[in-house]
Amino acid sequence: MPLDTQRLTEAIAARGDSAVALLERLIGYPSVRGQEGPAMRYLESQMRPLVDNAALVPVPDSIQADPDYSFRLENHTYADQPNLRLCWSGSGGGRSLIVNTHIDVVPPSPGQQDPFRARRANGIVSGRGACDCKGQIAMLYLALAALRDLKVQLRGDLIGHIVIEEECGGNGTLACVRGPDRADAALVLEPSELRILPSVRGAVWFATRVFGRAGHSGQAGRTVSALKEAIRAMEVLERYHDQLLAASKGHPLYDRFANPMPITFGMMAAGDWPAMAPNWAEFKGVLGFLPTRTREQVMAEMQQVLRTEGGDWLAEHFEMEFMYRHDCSEVPVAHPLVRTLQAASRDSGQVPEVAAMPASCDACFYTNLIGVPAIVFGAGSLGVAHSAQEEIAVEQIALGAQILARAIAAWCG
């Protein structure tokens, strides 16, 4: 039975201040990689009254040996990096749903003042993690609180995965999918401006090390500058990106974007002395790709073009490592969970929009690794995530919570 609009609106409003307070408190925790523990323990205490079971689940150090693990670090330990698992047990006979989002954040942006101090002004909450993804946690909290206050009974199980290390490749969600939880569908909460996103592009993060022949600046013709070869390698990879983008045209959900799968070179270093041709150079970056390719194909093609199009020297003098390897995640636009979210949006006074996510996230772990179709949905805008201007509107958290509550009740109820 659909939720009564007036009663749901009143329940959301009654809990709104506590949801915003939760968000502001969460922003205050600098939950970058390796430091998620305190924020997760606080969140567990706040979520416990809303579900049948809330448990901090240790992530085993052995996850670092998993072939889908991302961004290995020397001597890294998960001693204080638990995931949070929530469970609202259904009475039986209904569809089950996993709701996933993450508590980790990227480091502060250049020029971002007091990134871990929440600010609220004119109905906007700002600070690191405001929309990515602590605002999504507040939205989930608000939806669950409203459903409990309305004494909604679920028939299917609702499982929550609040995870660590999404930003560095999804290791928290990887630990979840290696566990026993399965469901009829999954909903991954990311800032989508309340759009329904059944298709999520993939991405690979890469580090390329180029080797040269060092020598004095006066020995022209005898030296090979690894720096110049690295620049040539970047040019080759940019051409590959352009070809891949052209070959990926025709997908109805992505063609609205001029470039939904950019290549970005974010870091570079080279050499040891200004007056010496460097014998090493390294650059790091990220390349997005659409469902026309798999991550294995993209990684192989990137290395192949450097061997065949970079010239004789580069072909034999580079190494490429892939630290983050998210495949695309795609679910049919006619999937029942998409339709459920569309109906929930309409019942909440919104015109539902089905679109694609021109970034990567943890949806692929559910869709591809364990066969649980995953849809992305959330409040706030990806356009301000990871920036000094990160923010989220309180009104959108409330509206998102209303849509989410309706969707949970319809899907699991």
Image (cartoon, rainbow, N blue to C red):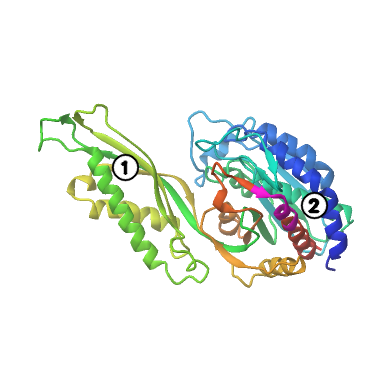
* Label 2 or label 1, whichever comes before in sequence order: 2
Q: Position of residue 182 (x, y in %)?
A: 68, 55
Say if residue 301 shows up in the picture: yes
Marks 2 and 1, how far apart in space?
A: 49 Å
Q: Quadrant of residue 6?
A: bottom right
Q: Position of residue 294 (x, y in %)?
A: 45, 59
Q: In this orientation, which residue lies closer to the viewer: 387 or 68?
A: 387
Under tag 1, what secondary structure? strand
Q: Position of residue 237 (x, y in %)?
A: 32, 53
Q: Position of residue 101 (x, y in %)?
A: 65, 49
Under tag 2, what secondary structure? helix
**Residue type (three-letter) at the residue carrying disc 2:** Leu
Task: Give the residue at mark 1.
Answer: 319
Q: In this orientation, which residue lies closer to the viewer: 111 or 40?
A: 111
- Residue drawn at 59 percent across, 55 percent down: 363
Q: Quadrant of residue 18?
A: top right
Q: Is residue 339 left or right of residue 221?
A: right
Say if residue 179 shows up in the picture: no
Q: Magenta region's main secondary structure?
A: helix
- Foreground mark, 2 or 1, reads 2
Which image quadrant: the C terminus? bottom right
Q: Which residues are magenta?
A: 392-399
Which image quadrant: the N terminus? bottom right
Confirm whether the magenta stretch covers residue 138. Answer: no
Task: Give the residue at mark 2.
Answer: 144
